[in-house]
Image (tube, grey):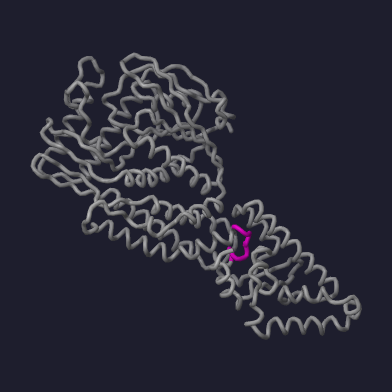
Amino acid sequence: MTNINVLVIGLWGYPGGWHRARYIPVVPNDKRCVGKPSCWVPGEGIDSYSTTIVEAVALKRLGFEIHLRIYGLDTLATPPRPSSGKQPGKAVEGDPRAKLVEEVGRRVEGSLCSDHIEYNDVVEVARWVLERFTDMYTKEVGEQLAASVSVLPGIGVYRACSNLRRFVYRGSPLNTYAALLIDLADALNCVDPDLVVLDISHGVNYLPVLGREAVHKSIRLYSALRGKKVVVAVVNSDPVQEPGQSSHIHLVELRTYEEKPLELFESTVSDLSMEELKPRALERVEPPKEIQELSRVIDYTSKSYTDLMNALTRASSYGLVLYILTRMAGLDLGELERDISSLEGKVKDALYSRSVRLEGDSVTVEHKYAVTPGVVDLLSALRLLKRLREAIKLDFKAWEGWVELELLEKLGGELGLSRIASKILMYEVQDIEKHVNALETLGVDLSKPLVYNTIIQVLNMSLEDAIAREKLREVLMEAEHKARSRPEQRCQANERHFYAHAGLERNIVEVKKQNGKIYIRYIPACLELINEIIAKGG
């Protein structure tokens, strides 16, 4: 790995009060071992106000391709008061940031001190604060970095407007967490990183905890969707009490993710609960329009896909690849993409539609409902479902259920079956191949479909019957007639055998051989029974 894409993530509180210090970054001493803790060593010290900027610059100077993503809360629109008691809009003597700090004060006064405030005004001021300080701190170290910022809904109480107006941000950290998960998915897709460095040094209150959890969860999903290995490094610095102090940035956590789509799909779907999908009321009030719309889309989406996802989860545990293919054949990929987009859009609408209420000298910015992590998990499950469907390179347009026998194993590998499930499937495929070829040596025409149980019965004939070739056709026709003449008996599959044989139970599948290749499918009349077996669980 020579060219390594790195996403450096910073969780920031208000940047205007940080001390300028000499930070000693922690960096890999070799690009080939970024996933090993022993590889991360102290680098050259860099004078800066921000540990995040120092980490990004240090990695860039070592030849890594750097993308910087800064997260902050919407409460940054009303910066906290410095400990000296001076307003954030007042310049601190001798501080090179004085001009920007005063500019922040003027921006707050101009945007949030009128009698009419909308939530977009709050978000735009917070975004502007993050962008200006990111730009200043980057230029201050003499480097150009590809940087972007994102504003998350926060909670807290702050003073602004010459200390005359009190801003109260009400809501739930759940909304911060959900917004971070949604945004991280976009950021990861844009950057396509091999290494993610999360700096929690500047985070305030609950942000570092939520940020760490969100990054790990997002990387697992991203790894599964992209089919790639991703290293996550979490760093944190010694506290800085005064300007000019020396401080080390430490590697506090290092993990490598290489997720299989099917395994992550199983765990995600297993954890889904309808109760956890519903937006949570923070007050006893009528849900706003955005929450009503989100609830409607959640209800529609879960009803449309829950049965399929649960069935696929059960099937994957036992290597039931033929069943997975059969169910996937009915999945409209275009419709699934539209449903994912619709659900994501409604989640964003709910998260970024905070009411703003002005009463006297108090401004309340609030969420009255919380978007639960379960909704984001539903989005993740749908994205994984899409990924699994795309991994199946079959044309389902005119599909009649037939699959090349050898292809089952290959598709099982592409889907990411567990080692045990793959073994069960492999042994069953080998047995079917052996039985079909054995029957063919007896001169039986296999160009027309035969119930697999018919093949087994014929091969189990006595030696005398096998020698008497004139009886073979008679026995074969009699067995096949019994298998096909009474569907209600034909589909009496043994449930234990169904799971033990990777879903290829002899009474419910039929096989044929064309152009030297063996094909298999479920008998169409047995599909209802098969779905019932899956619904009961293994």
- In the rendered view, does 8 fall on the left or right side of 118? right
Decide which of 241, 90 is in the foreground and name it.
241
**Looking at this rendering, what residue extends furthest in the left direction?**
360
Q: Position of residue 529 (x, y in %)?
A: 58, 74
Split into 4 quadrants, where in the image is the N terminus?
top right
Q: Position of residue 467 (x, y in %)?
A: 91, 77
- In the rendered view, does 381 fall on the left or right side of 393? left
- In the rendered view, does 502 fall on the left or right side of 339? right
Residue stretch in magenta = 317-325
Write down the quadrant of residue 55 in the picture: top left
- In the rendered view, does 29 fall on the left or right side of 476? left
Q: Is residue 429 above or below residue 148?
A: below
Q: Position of residue 310 (x, y in %)?
A: 51, 62
Task: Name which residue lies at 12% across and 30% down.
Answer: 162
Task: Name which residue lies at 26% across and 26% down.
Answer: 16
Task: Name which residue lies at 73% across and 77% down.
Answer: 448
Q: Is residue 16 above or below residue 495?
A: above
Split into 4 quadrants, where in the image is the C terminus?
bottom right
Q: Is residue 435 above or below residue 424?
A: below
